[in-house]
Amino acid sequence: LLFRKLLSDNLLQQNAKVLVLTGDIYCLSNDCTVDFPDAKDKGQQAYCRSKLGVNWIYFELIKRYPGIWFNLIHPGVIANELSVEEVSWFMKSMLISCEAGAQVTLICSTSSTTDGLLEKGAYYHNVYGRITLPSNDNSLNQEKAG
């Protein structure tokens, strides 16, 4: 909604930077429907699908607005009230702090688009840095993305 408002009010300059947050958990889903055959993990399935949907929207925005600088960002799996309930001790040990999770977002948001540190349209992960998605990645499935 904010992006639409900025566009409609002509508030985005050429090469304006727009960062889209996702989660690499999207890879556990291959569709973005509301059909949940297994009611056991509805919450996780919904979250995975929502991240896949975010990725589909991101790749569509890149096509529609080539003059805008977009980056897709995975900040990490953050330890917060949403992620620590009913999680095993092992999973809790893998969660990162909000401060650590903010790092990749801060780097991408404060880096100049001309200093060569960032690539336009790239996906940045908190652990792996810039990621190139394989051609068979669900995020790139244009047929399902619609």
Image (cartoon, rainbow, N blue to C red):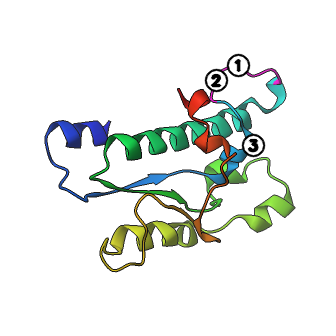
Label 1 sits on residue: 35
* Label 1: few (<14), some (14–19) or many (≥20) C-alpha neighbours in 10 Å: few
Q: Quadrant of residue 50?
A: top right
- Residue drawn where x is 79% and y is 33% of the image: 41
144 vs 37, nearest the viewer: 144
Please give left or right for residue 7 compared with residue 144 in the image.
left
The x, y position of residue 51, in whole percent, is: 59, 42
Label 2 sits on residue: 33
The x, y position of residue 123, in whole percent, is: 53, 60
144 vs 41, nearest the viewer: 144
Q: Secondary structure at mark 3?
A: helix
Which stretch is magenta?
Answer: 32-38
95 is higher (above) or lower (below) than 3: below
Label 3 sits on residue: 28
Magenta residue check for 133: no
Q: Quadrant of residue 89?
A: bottom right
Please give left or right for residue 56 compared with residue 127 in the image.
left
Q: Quadrant of residue 45?
A: top right
Magenta residue check for 36: yes
Q: Are marks 1 and 2 in contact (CB under 8 Å)?
A: yes
